[in-house]
Image (spheres, rainbow, N blue to C red):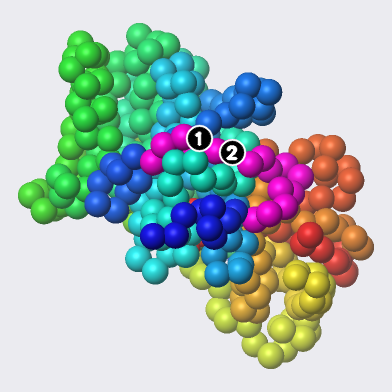
Amino acid sequence: MASMQTDPAPAAVPPGFERLRVKAVIRETADAHSIVFEVPDDRADRFAYAPGQFLTLRVDVDGETCLRCYSLASSPSVDADLKVSIKRVAGGRVSNRLLDTVQAGDEIVVMPPKGVFRLRESEAPVVLFAAGSGITPVISILKQILVTTARPVTLVYANRDERSVIFRHELAGLAARHADRFTLVHRFDDREGPLTAGAVAAQTRVGEAQFYMCGPAPFMQMVRNSLRDAGIAEERIFLESFDGEIDETPAAPAATGAEAAGEDAAARVVVRHHGADHAFGVRAGETVHAAATRQGLSLPFSCKAGYCGLCLARVTSGTVTMKDNLGGVSDAQIAEGWTLACQAQVTSPEATLVFE
Ligand SMILES: Cc1cc2nc3c(=O)[nH]c(=O)nc-3n(C[C@H](O)[C@H](O)[C@H](O)COP(=O)(O)OP(=O)(O)OC[C@H]3O[C@@H](n4cnc5c(N)ncnc54)[C@H](O)[C@@H]3O)c2cc1C
């Protein structure tokens, strides 16, 4: 088995990233491993985090540098070290690379914590929904609730079967230690079938609770719709999506030849990526990233919601505005001409975006 040292992380550490040593690898289930990072004292401030945030790992896979986000499963008020947990995705480049090769002592290039999925201050009860690897930010928030607040909390954790449960022992320990206010509900597809709207609605009887969720897109959509149908206001629902923004609009039809030429578009954009220029039309209200995807151009992305910062690009001509910016680009960077392609809408007849 090759380690990350024999097939190293990218040699150069780009601005905004740090090289961290792997302190331990924990086999959580047959297809999920945790990686525990050692953070040097002089980097502790950069790696301070709020429960629910994620790290971005920069990993070389077959000569290509890939960026992937992994939520922190550790919680600063409980755990001394930073820990992410990765579930194998069939055919996935980075998850397989990390699970198959990373060992204690390896080094990985990591971007410090980011993200806006966090516990909102309140004394209200909390209901957490997680499915599969979606438990990672949820257990971090759960530990924060149990250690730093007196709030009652319920976790509904859905998995295919009992063997797939990540953090089974840690969760059981938390349930035993906080039995007075923590209710742990496991849900197994092989016994009861997938989580139902009825089971979600049953959790809304907790008065004025806040609801947090993370899991695959269909799970999140079902939970979110069920909460809405049960009359829960949007302001009480918080979610983290591993698959990018939950898109509730139908996919745009594939580009026609005329659109590719920009004839049917509201603006024309040139995107420079890996040194090559790609010119295409962007429809009114469409983001540069969505238009690029429609053209078959694969640009960096992950959250598609404006917070992971992976689609950061510099606007070198024309103007853009962002639908949303949840922290993926700072005000100072915007002033220097940076934008997030997943949020950028072109406001001039032509614009050029450069991915560096
Ligand atoms: C905020 C956040 C937190 C996450 N936390 C966890 C976690 O705790 N545990 C976990 O197991 N997974 C987590 N994920 C999912 C994780 O980032 C990977 O998507 C997953 O491991 C599969 O990656 P892969 O390379 O194995 O699969 P692949 O199929 O090779 O890639 C899958 C994903 O990579 C991204 N991607 C594809 N092409 C590109 C590109 N050109 N540039 C940039 N990105 C691209 C897309 O998001 C795509 O869906 C999280 C995702 C997000 C957004």
Q: Quadrant of residue 124?
A: top left
Q: Is residue 326 left or right of residue 317?
A: left
Q: Is residue 71 visible?
A: no
Q: Quadrant of residue 183?
A: top left
Q: Nearer the viewer, residue 194 or 144?
A: 144
Does the residue tagged 1 have its C-beta within 8 Å of any atom of ligand 1? no
Contact between marks 2 and 1 (CB within 8 A): the answer is: yes
Q: Nearer the viewer, residue 285 or 190?
A: 190
Q: Quick one: quadrant of the C terminus? A: bottom right
Image x and y of residue 163, in percent: 17, 47
Give above or below for 344 relative to 159.
below
Q: Is residue 282 left or right of residue 82?
A: right
Q: Which mark is residue 37?
A: 1
Q: Quadrant of residue 151?
A: top left
Residue at 31% from the left image edge and 28% from the top image edge: 127
Query: How far, Cα to Cα, is label 2 from label 1?
Result: 6 Å
Image x and y of residue 255, in percent: 63, 82
Q: Nearer the viewer, residue 147 or 61?
A: 61
Image x and y of residue 20, in percent: 59, 38
Residue at 44% from the left image edge and 60% from the top image edge: 2
Label 2 vs 1, first from the N-terminus: 2
Q: Amino acid at mark 2?
A: Leu
Give above or below for 264 relative to 73.
below
Q: Quick one: quadrant of the N terminus? A: bottom left
Q: Which mark is residue 80?
A: none
Give above or below for 298 relative to 304.
below
Q: Which residues are magenta?
A: 10-25
Q: Nearer the viewer, residue 134 or 87?
A: 87
Image x and y of residue 33, in percent: 35, 46
Q: Residue at label 2?
A: 20
Q: Amino acid at mark 1?
A: Phe
Q: Is residue 219 magenta?
A: no
